Image (cartoon, grey):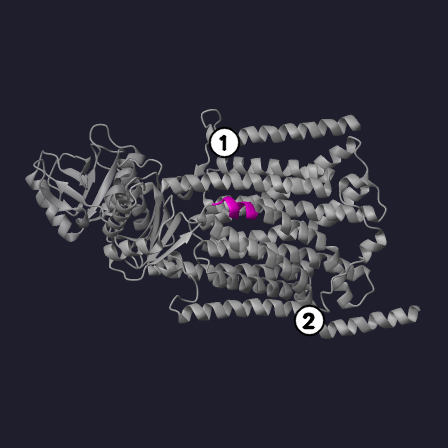
Amino acid sequence: MKSKGTLTFALLCAVALGLGILSYFGIGAQQHLGIGNISLGLDLRGGVTILYEADIPNPSAEDMNDANNLLRRRLDERNYTEATTGREGQRQIRVNIPGVEDPERAVAEIGRTALLTFRNEAGEILLTGAEVARARTQVDAGQTGAGRIVVGLDFTAEGARNFEQATRENLGRPILIYMDDHMISAPTVQSVITGGSAQIDGGMMGFTREEADDLSNTINAGALPFGLTVVSMNSIGAQLGADALETSIIAGIIGLVLMIVSLLIVYKISGLAASIALITYAFLMLIVISGFGITLTLPGMAGIILSIGMALDANVIIFERIREEIATGRTLRSALKVGFKRAFPAVLDCNITTLMAAGALFWQGTGPIQGFAITLGLGIIISMFSALVLTRILIESLVGMGLKNPKWFGAPVPSEEENQKPAFQLKVIEWRKRYLIISGVILLAGVGSMLFNFSQGRGLFNLDVEFSGGTSFQIDMGQPFVNADIAAIVYQITGQPSPQVQSIGGDNQAMIRMHSIDGETRTALMDAIIARWPHLTSEAFTYADVSPTVSADMQRAAVWAVIVACVLMLIYITYRFKDVRMGASTVMTLLHDALMTIAVFAILRIPLNYAFIAVLLTIMGYSINATIVIFDRLRENKGRMRVDSATLVNISVSQTLRRSILTSATTLLMVISLFILGVPTIRDFALPIMIGLLFGTYSSVFLSGSFWYMLGKSSNEVADKKITKKASVSI
């Protein structure tokens, strides 16, 4: 048995090592393995992302696909081979171009409405794409070219007349078809074409269906009845992107190491098994991201790091259950089996509710937020496998190797009596008014901060351009600077008298916010700042320009994501616990956390941007995990303890207190490393999560049980009287 356990443990360690090597090659050595490199988002490598919108209200899906294909071809023609395009919603197309040196030129080149022209040999324009009603791929049914793939053309009424005249004047000669200045076809006119239809046969070589589809799409794109307007643009300097990638990786590694050390100190042998499982989990995440071609963004990396905290949470829930089963006198093997079994419902519920939050993010989010939702969702799924499968196999292997002393599997085990009724019991119900007053004071401070700043003309919140519209710059100055010097340059170039200029991330990063400016003015402003500080280059600049329409859409998406997540969680918790009070108490706890997060953003004037929705739902996800663990224990104790409702809540919270503290503390280690080492963008993400984790733990421990108690106070009193009556009868 001992040799079998040793072999299993060694095999799993070898697998973990192999996954580490595989993930390394997945990141940086595609030539060795065929799983592909991890694709880095623009915020990690630099580049420009542009959101185009059709200038008509209801374009057809076919027209939008044609526009997307046109932008893709233009990117290829200009050697932007790593660029990506994709539709968003009904009217928008997002274009990402990594490594672009001149964003303004790139936007001007690819965003113009396509000009399709038909010309004679002398280069004179005979008619334009506006006179083509539709182009389509079809099979020639004629006698000479039957069965060949051709491109059919249908002209407008005016186009039919002009095309008939063009073919009559160029009989026996080619008509050249151009898209912008690029010739895409040159069919020879065989006869005068009447009736408003024609076809392009591809010459002697003919068309493949793919070539015909491409040509018809190109012609249709050239004949689009709408233009594309830039409604949002974000340029990230390569220097800032590289710094973000490096610091995020270092922060992630340090945070993971701190987590592992904490596990080893508290849980010893169990902690060793969980540490190996966590490392394997991290490698698996990298392999999955690489294998499925997922673009890794800065919020996506934060999603990975936070999902590591989810994996840790599952392990802590399991280990605490094992300790309690040992306290009842079970053998170690029996305690392991029962501990995993009893921990499973809480682990499952925690992960499903967090998946709901990730789903709401993906549904309402765009770009980087969807990347965060994808990595968080994948991380949750893999973390369940890590905690419930890998950790269990590793622990059982270690036991099989002869490590059977219960003291090696955690802190000193309480007696069964202490486990049933902990010697230290929090006064959750007795002091509930005090806890609510604390939350009320913080909420009032947030409201006061909002009103004060509004009276000073600064707005209720510190809205970033994603939520307010306008143009923002982030500049890596590389040395201390004076805000007023930059503000003076902004005023000189733009004429805007009161731009917001502030230092972020220390003394060497500048943030500028102003009303929207055009591309020419943006370039002039960058040139003026470089002239004042000659050591700067364009790579030190990151800027964003967002239209008011897009910013309003993002605010609406944030509200809907929170509402949808809360409704789904309410339904799920009510169903799982068969208790409407628990579902309602959970939503009240989540609402408390949302209000506390908003208050923190208002008091600290943290920029309210696209990351806000990710921060908010991440905090709510962690909070609901702790609440579920408490309610799971409350439900269990309710069936086996003859105590009044207040004592029931106090005991249940006290029994799960170690789990709440350990999970929050170790996850905080990860987030703190992000805050200390991360770039300003990551710090704006990490700071509210740190504060939110504290509030989430606070609300779960001190308020969730209180809400449950208060919602059923009358029914609790009836139940308590019955318990008291039975107790007196038994005496």
x, y percent for residue 485:
31, 54
Task: Return the residue nearer the eye: 134 or 485.
Answer: 485
Q: Which mark is residue 26?
A: 1
Quarter of the rendering occupied by the N terminus = top right
> What residue span does the magenta drawing correspond to?
671-678
Magenta part, dominant SS: helix
Q: Kindly indicate the quadrant of the structure image that contains residue 536.
A: top left
Task: Return the residue nearer the eye: 370 or 72.
Answer: 370
Identify whether 217 is placed above or below 515.
above
Outermost right residue = 731
Q: Is residue 433 shown left or right of residue 561?
A: right
The residue pinned by badge 2 equals: 710
In three-dimensional space, the C-alpha distance between marks 1 and 2, rounded to whole angstroms, equals: 53 Å
Task: Return the residue nearer the eye: 553 or 226.
Answer: 553
x, y percent for residue 465:
37, 57
Identify whether 554 is placed above or below 337.
below
The total number of labels drawn is: 2
Q: Which mark is residue 598?
A: none
Q: Secondary structure at mark 2?
A: helix
Disc 1: CA contacts within 10 A as few (<14), some (14-19) or many (>=20): many
Is residue 138 in view?
Answer: no
Q: Is residue 287 shown left or right of residue 141?
A: right
Is residue 169 in view?
Answer: yes
Quarter of the rendering occupied by the C terminus = bottom right
> Which callout, 1 or 2, points at the residue further toward the start of the chain?
1
Residue 223 among magenta residues: no
